[in-house]
Amino acid sequence: MKVTLNRINDAYHFQAKNERGHIIELDSRAEFGGSDLAASPMELLLVALAGCNAIDIISILKKQRQEVTSYKTEVEGIRVQIDEAKPFKEINLIIYLEGNILPEKALKAAQLSFDKYCSVSKTIESTAKINYKVILNNLAI
């Protein structure tokens, strides 16, 4: 797996491209000298976590013949100052599922994703505590 990062402007606006040609832009916030033209690297880390889990959960539920009609995740990262860096110490996800899905299957799919399948969560779990909850058809399960 390989990506290439190219600077777009004279500040911190970049464009990343993977080997298949897909492009993502990133930038820094204006208060840190950027142009705020795209998500920050730390925001993209949260996106990567949410996306990895979403792919796993939907895949697991499809294999179990559960009908997912809507999927949304809210992710909040809580950071801590360590020297000059501010890594995440905790990440909280709320997964919103809608459809004809058995609650126990929804919970099991989420648990399997976080504990076994999601490479992103496995990569960051040693440095940030990951918490999640599942809301199925507007009810917490």
Image (tube, rainbow, N blue to C red):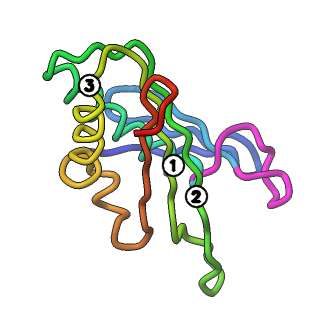
Mark 3 crowd level (few <14, some 14–19, many ≥20, 10 Å Cα): few
Residue under pointer 2: 77
Q: Secondary structure at mark 1?
A: helix
The circle drawn on residue 96 is none
Q: Residue furthest left?
A: 63
Residue 68 % position (x, y): 34, 17
Of marks 3 and 1, which one's residue comes earlier in the chain?
1
Is residue 6 rendered to the left or right of residue 68?
Answer: right
Is residue 25 rendered to the left or right of residue 120?
Answer: right
Amino acid type indicated by mark 1: Leu
Of marks 1 and 2, which one's residue comes earlier in the chain?
1
The circle drawn on residue 46 is 1
Residue found 42% across the figure and 60% down from its top: 130
Amino acid type indicated by mark 3: Leu
Residue under pointer 3: 102
Badges 3 and 1: C-beta atoms under 8 Å apart?
Answer: no
Amino acid type indicated by mark 2: Gly
User: Dividing the image into 4 quarters, which one contains the C terminus?
Assistant: top left
Residue found 68% across the figure and 38% down from its top: 38
Residue 15 % position (x, y): 57, 38
- The nearer-to-camera label among 1 and 2 is 2
Q: Secondary structure at mark 2?
A: strand
Q: Which residues are magenta?
A: 28-41
User: Dividing the image into 4 quarters, which one contains the N terminus?
Assistant: top left
Is residue 15 rendered to the left or right of residue 111?
Answer: right
Residue 114 % position (x, y): 29, 51
Residue 124 % position (x, y): 37, 63
Mark 2 crowd level (few <14, some 14–19, many ≥20, 10 Å Cα): some
Q: Secondary structure at mark 3?
A: loop
Residue found 63% across the figure and 87% down from its top: 83
